[in-house]
Amino acid sequence: ASLGLVETHQGGGTFVREYKGEIFLNPLFPMLALEAADIFDVLEYRKIIETGTVAVAVEKADEKAIAALEKAYEKMVEESSDTHRFANADLDFHLELAKSTGNPIIIKINDFIKTLLSASMDDIVFNLGVVDGLHYHRKILDAIESRDTELAQSLMKDHIDRTIVRLRKEGKK
């Protein structure tokens, strides 16, 4: 079960899982699950991946994907008075961004590290609040809608760079 080859259903038994490509990532899981991730390592990863992801989203996001991003953004606005719920909505925005690329590798990797991303998002929002997330996500979404790759990438990079700078000012290590 820990290797992801079988799954157990209480009262139902143990079943062999359907073979999926993510089984090859399973050797990484214990490392990611057991080691406390440094928030700056996560942000460095996000800057690299999400800057590229947003470029693909500009190119490939259809009306349905943009509507899902709008809905995720609206959820962020609705949850802005509760940091934990806002952090979840913020993460959902980033996961929808990955989905909007239509690239199964980007989507699966984000799904695979969702727990890691969630913990870092909680930490970020708890320490920095919601204002930057709302500001940048709106602008990134507008850039995707206007099909401006350069602007979308620049905004994503600025968003993550600003988060790093602000966390360091807050004394995060």
Image: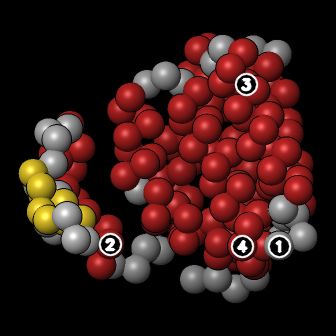
Kindly indicate the quadrant of the structure image that contains residue 34: bottom left
* Residue holding disc 1: 82
* Residue holding disc 4: 84
Q: Are marks 1 and 4 in contact (CB under 8 Å)?
A: yes
Q: Amino acid at mark 4?
A: His
* Mark 2 vs mark 1: in front: 1
Disc 2 to disc 1, C-alpha distance: 26 Å
Q: Amino acid at mark 2?
A: Ala
Q: Is residue 90 shown to the viewer in this render?
A: yes
In the displayed structure image, the side of residue 152 where residue 99 appears, left or right: left
Q: Are marks 2 and 1 in contact (CB under 8 Å)?
A: no
* Mark 4 vs mark 2: in front: 4
Q: Earlier in the sequence, mark 3 or mark 1?
A: 3
Disc 3 to disc 1, C-alpha distance: 25 Å
Q: Which residue is drawn at the image coordinates 73% and 24% (left, top)?
A: 66
Where does the C terminus fall, quadrant-wise?
Answer: bottom right
Mark 4 Cα-neighbour bin, 10 Å: few <14, some 14–19, many ≥20: some
* Label 1 element class: loop
Q: Which residue is drawn at the image coordinates 54% and 50% (left, top)?
A: 46
Mark carried by residue 135: none
Q: Earlier in the sequence, mark 4 or mark 2?
A: 2
* Residue holding disc 2: 33
